[in-house]
Image (cartoon, rainbow, N blue to C red):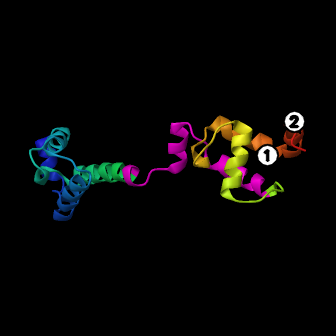
């Protein structure tokens, strides 16, 4: 193993600075440095090869990207909330219904359909959003069913 490292290119100053920057941005501590040293079988950052540094920088950069730029659609699905496609469909269908078009009117209609009040439409469950879509798609029938005509 030591022989292979002699043949490989040593880490560059730029890579060392990048690793330190990423550790700081990720709020990693001494234990995280030790874990990195153990993983790459080195005693300090300066002992790493360029390939090891590149691998480490990529892993930390990817992790930082996931922390800083979460995918809103996936977070909604994880929390069980409606997805962007459902919100877009609700918005489109709401535009087709012959009622006053404002956000409070939409929330009022959603409460009539689901029986629940939502401060933000985005927070409703996927099932409730599906119910809203079905009701909006069949608006005239729904009004008759509720005796609203």
The answer to whether 111 appears left or right of 42 in the picture is: right
Q: Earlier in the sequence, mark 1 or mark 2?
A: 1
Between 52 and 149, the residue placed more toward the observer is 149
The residue that appears at 71% across and 54% down in the rendered structure is 105
- Where, by quadrant of the figure, is residue 110 drawn? top right
Query: Dot 1, crowdedness within 10 Å: few (<14), some or many (≥20)?
Result: many
Give the SS element for disc 1. helix
The answer to whether 56 appears left or right of 121 in the picture is: left
Residue 64 is situated, as x and y percent measured from the top left of the image, at 34, 52
The verdict on residue 31 being magenta is: no
Q: Is residue 131 visible?
A: no
Quarter of the figure with the N terminus: top left
- Where, by quadrant of the figure, is residue 43 drawn? top left
> Mark 1 against mark 2, which lies toward the viewer?
2
**Image marks 1 and 2: residues in contact by CB distance under 8 Å:** no
Residue placed under numbered mark 1 in the picture: 136
The residue that appears at 17% across and 57% down in the rendered structure is 11
Q: Magenta region, mostly helix, strand or loop?
A: helix
Query: Dot 2, crowdedness within 10 Å: few (<14), some or many (≥20)?
Result: few
Q: Which mark is residue 15?
A: none
Q: Which mark is residue 145?
A: 2
Residue interval drawn in magenta: 66-95
Residue 98 is situated, as x and y percent measured from the top left of the image, at 84, 56
């Amino acid at each position: 193993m030591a022989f292979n490292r002699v043949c490989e290119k040593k880490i560059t100053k730029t890579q060392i600075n990048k690793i330190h920057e990423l550790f700081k941005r990720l709020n990693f501590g001494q234990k995280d440095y030790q874990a990195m040293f153990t993983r790459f079988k080195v005693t300090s950052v300066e002992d790493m090869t360029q390939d090891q540094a590149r691998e480490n920088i990529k892993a930390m950069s990817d992790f930082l990207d996931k922390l800083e730029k979460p995918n809103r659609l996936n977070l909604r699905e994880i929390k069980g909330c409606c997805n962007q496609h459902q919100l877009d469909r609700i918005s489109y269908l709401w535009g087709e219904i012959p009622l006053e078009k404002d956000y409070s009117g939409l929330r009022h209609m959603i409460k009539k359909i689901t029986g629940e009040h939502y401060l933000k439409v985005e927070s409703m469950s996927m099932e409730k959003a599906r119910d809203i879509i079905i009701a909006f798609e069949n608006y005239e029938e729904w009004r008759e069913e509720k005796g609203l005509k």
